[in-house]
Amino acid sequence: MTGFWRQALAVAGRDLVGEIRSGEVLLVTAPFGGVALLLIPMAIGTDRPLLARIGPGMYWVVVLLFGILVALRRSAAESPSQRDQLGLLGIDPAARFTGQGLANTALLGLYAGVLAPVAVALYDPDLAGWWWMALVLPLTVAGVALLATVAGRLVAALDSGPALVPLLVAPLAVPLLLGATQALEGLRLGESILGWLLLLAAVDLALAVAGVLGARPLEEAAR
């Protein structure tokens, strides 16, 4: 294992330990996500065919919105003194971004996994081809985590970062939401979803490359 990956895993472990201590995802965010999924059927009524049709889309919207808040909160929780300490320890900024991305991906994967049975119970969607979720879910979760990690680094680097986050997140989140929802719709209709999986993978790769290449300039701007 190279020094880069040792550093990245050390950062990821630190962030995950911090989450275990705070319990923010399971104790706070996951219940709010479940309530958000519950409010939609209450607003629409008991039209079960309609609920089954829109259920997967609503699930992905909640995962996207609350997931970005979770990852952004974890990325922004790092204080300037902590960043300076990591710099003095010789932690590569790209390794720090990678570690934060890995930790955020693990947290959002847990969050999405907790919400999935809630969505199935509330919306009773068509579960045809459900095993494809083993690919769709990790690709979507990784994209959301990387997007929020990039946004969090911008918040730390720019004084106007918080104001820019919606402008950054909204357009880049569209292909993730489109790929995830259309993949499930394709499974329901018995169509190939390879194109949507490739779209999700391409977005993940683009965000990972952008985050790694921009890690050092953003860290220098934050000082």
Image (spheres, rainbow, N blue to C red):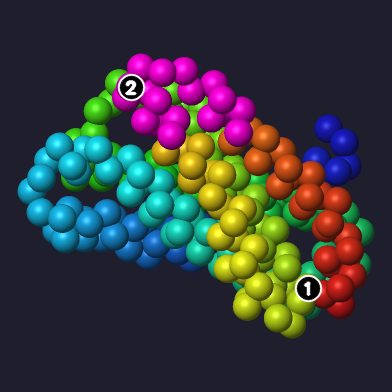
Pick the residue in front: 190 or 221.
Answer: 190
User: Disc number at residue 157?
Assistant: 1
Check residue 94 for magenta coloring: no
Pick the residue in front: 120 or 200.
Answer: 200
What segment is highlighted magenta in the picture? 182-199
For disc 2, the marked residue is 189
Question: Label 1's element?
Answer: helix
Relative horizontal placement of residue 207, taking residue 218 as reference (left or right): left
Identify the residue shown where x is 84% and y is 57%: 214
**Within 10 Å of the Cα at label 1, are there few (<14), some (14-19), or many (20+) other Cα atoms?**
some
Identify the residue shown where x is 54% and y is 50%: 174
Disc 2 residue type? Leu
Identify the residue shown where x is 25% and y is 28%: 126
Pick the residue in front: 3 or 184.
Answer: 184
Check residue 196 for magenta coloring: yes
Q: Earlier in the sequence, mark 2 or mark 1?
A: 1
Q: Main secondary structure of the magenta part?
A: helix
Relative horizontal placement of residue 209, taking residue 30 as reference (left or right): right
Identify the residue shown where x is 33% and y is 40%: 56
